[in-house]
Amino acid sequence: MKWYVTACPRNCYSSCGFRVKSDNGRIIGIDKLSSNIATQNGPCVKGQSYINRVYNPERVTEPLLKDKDGLFKEISWEKAIDIITDKINDTINKYGSKSIFYLAGSGMSGILNGFAYDFWKQLGGVTLSYGNLCWPAGLEATRLTLGDNKHNHPWDIENADLIILWGKNPAETNIHQMDFIYNAIDKGAKLISIDPRRTKSSHRSSLKLSPKQGTDAALALAISAELIKTGDIDNNFIDAHVKGFDSFADSIKHCSIEWASEICDIPVGDINSMIDIIVNSNKISVVPGYGMQRYSNGGQTIRSILTIPIITGNIGKSGTGWYYANLQSYIFDDIKEPISYRPDICDPDFRRTISTPNIAVDMINQNSPELKIAWIERANPLTQYPDTNMLLDAFQKLDFIIVSEQFMTDTAMSADIVLPAKTMFEQSDIVSSYWNPYIQIRQKIIDPPGNVKTETEVYSLLAKNIGLHNGNEFLYPVTDIQVDNYLSSVLSEKGIDYNELKKAPVIHSSVEEIAFSDYIFNTKSGKIELWSDEAKALWDVSELPKYVPIDDDLDYNFAIISPNSHDKIHSQFGNLDIISDHNPVPIVYGHPDDLIPLNIKDGSLVRVYNSRGEIYLKCRYDYSIKKGCLSLDNGWWMSQGASINMLSKSGFTDMGYGAALHNNRVSIEKL
Amino acid sequence: MDRQFIFDTNRCAGCRACVVACANKNNNANNNYWRKVSEYNSNNHPLFPVFYISMACNHCDTHPCLTNCPAKAYSIDSNGAVIHDSEKCIGCRYCTWICPYNAPVFNGKTAVVSKCTSCTDNLFESGNPACTEACPLSALTYSTCNSKKDTMSGVTGNKAKPNIKFSEFKTRHTIGNDVSKRANRAFIDSILKRGNKLKEEIPLLVFTVLFIVIVAATIFNTLANNNITKSYNNMHLFGAGIITMLISFLHLGKKQRSFRAILNLKQSWLSREILLSGLFTGLLFITYFITNIIADIITVSVGITLIISIDMVYLRINNKINMLIKAGSASFITIIITAIIISNTISTAIISSLASVIITIDIIRNYKINSKALFRTISILSILACNIIENNYTIILLITFTIIERAWFYYTLPVLSTQELLNKNLLKESNKMFVY
Ligand code: SF4
Ligand code: SF4
Ligand code: SF4
């Protein structure tokens, strides 16, 4: 029996370090890793569910080929590699390599993933997507304003005396941050939560505000305007470090509390209380979420909220700051997000022409050459990308779909070949995170079960079969020794000892404990930019933060939000029995005062629909949700009952090439 | 206990990492989870706080599970933990109803109960139970606790004396309330609907109804003696008794261990009930051959004790229910039936009117849950009808009445669980706060 140090590679703020006990090649226990201070109490419920995930009887462990009747049959790897080789060769001969679409998601982070690009490049370059589903508008807004996406060490939030959770619900999406927030509250800090729902993170808040969807910027600007009016701002800080304050102050003169109250549908008194609390706090940490920037005005919303910590001087000191994303541990990337999302950031051998926000339309409209093959890995686009029905059409148009997966997701079901994918315990790799400041390793602890092969081995086999291998047995790191050598050489370039990492995570020397404490801002002017010429030049938005109303499709009566829940990372985990036992079916929540007039009872089956699609599911009452708003958790598969993206809309955020898929309206009716 | 759970509602986020950690270590997934997370105000009513309670076994000082288990499957280990031995368990499920926290879990596959061991066989170097080791928010810990235990009234502050130090939720919520009266009514309805009820226990319903009828018929048989020609004798009743016992035997999870059911006569009313039902059935057989007034009296007394023990079994599940004015109580129904079968006009009239009044009170007291008031009305009518109609149909009416009353009793008898305790508190609060 042995304990191994590892780290969770999910697309999750926490990126927990934890330890795994294995016995005779089998994982039998999961426990905390105290040396990772950010996640010292151990992984979340999803991390605890890994044993169930690795050994789940529904896990795909053999290559599967879809037959003429649409049924999947197990085939050997030789056969799978032969079929794929033939398809690729054939397609390249007829249409060229750009007719292959390589789509990788955020399903498992690790630097070995990069070898996929090497393979596709050797093949002549394929078509790629640009943009991102998740967070680009906010990243770009922060980059334009502060110059970098970074924040204090996660535990520093304990030193705040006011924490504003603005659209973030860490109790479900970043539970380890909640630990520090509770510590802060225990020491006397106040918590304000701003969310259309009464989230699990809001139960101990002193104040809770629920602005209407897409109006957060109005609330933020009204608060900033009032703070400026009453002089409750940090003039020294502004003079020294902020560009464009005066024009900003001018531009928001009209943003009165009454104005915001009307737009956001929040009582004037609540906005006043919020201002009171801000005025009476010395150290304010603002923690925005990602949901509210997935609107057409997302970037401007984030810029507007960011004005509050800026004008009050809450940047660069302990207990203060802007917790959007901490990309300081992304030390292996040459170009970081959000710049890396741009279509022109592209190896000339590739074609990067499919936008993530409009993936379906762009796939359908590709020509010279058209798309013929899709290779999808670490992704489940049929539940996670906007407008599923349209995307299904785009998939229909393809000749051949290859999906690398652990489970039969909606996307895997659409494939012609499903390749069994490894889990995090079956190949070593490195994990960086956007909240946790550590560089961590996830170690190989067990051999892959059944006939699962790691992606680097699959690409090596394909390269060999296609004839790209230059005489090497493996073109990419495949054996344990090759992987170890590769990882340790990459790490040693950054001054990190691979073997030390196996014992405990490390914080790279470049990581600032208190971000911006040197008051160096990586913007054009070297200052915090409230006025950003770059914003105008790049995205054609106002140079100043501004409230821009979203366009509401008023044919449908409800806004619908799709928050992430504590037991899923996007579409992962919900299928495991240890998770679904407690959360078996998708549920849409709404306010009883909205639903009773529609004759919908607590527990009724309902149809939720708009012009893009419809779903049938159970409805429950939520007595605290914003009226006029429904909520259905993100990540449910169509095959589990109802996926939110059957209804969501394609479209760009105002900056950063993000998907504005939360601009979504629907109607609901009783079945 | 040396060490005990310490739980802070102010830190728990209801994430269930503890539940899954317990399942990992103790192999109790597939809906047999030992640890459960309950939620106060899960529908988020703005007037009330929302908080979570993670609970498994609290290894209570008075351990009602151990006391009431008929098969003596429970014991206390050297650390003071209450341990259940599935090798001794007969799968009667009684402890799952008796425990205020619903800690013992019946597993349909193994047909026995299992429950939290406080991780006596430890996996972690820390020596902590898996659940406490896993809590990302340190809401659930395990440690020595000398101070006086904090409790939450109606949840951990109760007669079972659970070994848990419990911090109540402190935050005053400040959310504006604009919920309509109509929605408030729906809120109350949904709390009421949520409770665990015994309703699925059809074999138990059959067992009690049949024994009520058999005992009533025996009393009648004894009293009526020579005057009336009996349409049945004790051999018929014996047959009915055997069938009844067979039904309850089939309902046990582990039939081959059924002999264990009477091991705990000293403490468990269930053991007593089982022994008495056997004894009573045996006496019916004997009294068929021996017609002797003393034998008859003994038989009737054993029958009456059996009926009382049936009531005691349910009284123990939920001592808040007042058995006497609960229309479904076995003793109560037996009295009515006996009175009516004896058919003494005056006593019947008095008792049946009384019955109607009690049932009506019962309906009124439970009006909120009583969507099935029609059934209750029918049963009142059936009792009153017995006064008027005096023929063979009367007995059918009576049995129908008994089944309805007893089914209603099962339908409304709450089986306690942490969630149920929280729901009760919430119901109390809502009744205080809402204006209709
Ligand atoms: S999903 Fe997130 S919180 Fe959970 S174990 Fe992984 S990194 Fe930690
Ligand atoms: S792990 Fe901790 S926070 Fe999560 S439900 Fe259990 S006790 Fe609560
Ligand atoms: S103490 Fe052990 S057995 Fe009991 S609930 Fe916790 S993990 Fe489960």
Image (cartoon, coloured by chain):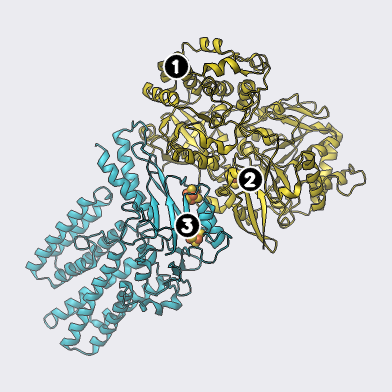
Chain colours: A yellow, B cyan
Measure the C-alpha gap from mark 2 to mark 3: 40 Å
Q: Nearer the viewer, residue B365 or B235?
A: B365
Mark 3 is surrounded, within 10 Å at the Cα level, by few (under 14), some (14 to 19) or many (20 or more) other residues, namely: many
Closer to the camera in the image, A224 or B314:
A224
What kind of residue is marked 3? Tyr
Residue picked out by circle 1: A226
Is label 3 within 8 A of ligand 3 (CB to nearest ligand atom)?
yes
Residue B206 % position (x, y): 32, 68
Task: Please name the amino acid that badge 2 sits on.
Answer: Thr
Chain of the residue under the numbered disc 3 shown in the image: B
Residue under label 2, please give it. A409
Number of numbered discs:
3
Q: Which residue matches tag 3?
A: B142
Q: Which mark is residue B433?
A: none
Q: Quadrant of the N terminus of chain B?
A: bottom left
Task: For mark 1, name the chain.
Answer: A
Q: Is residue B167 left or right of residue A326?
A: left
Where does the image place residue B289, in percent across and percent down from the top left?
24, 89
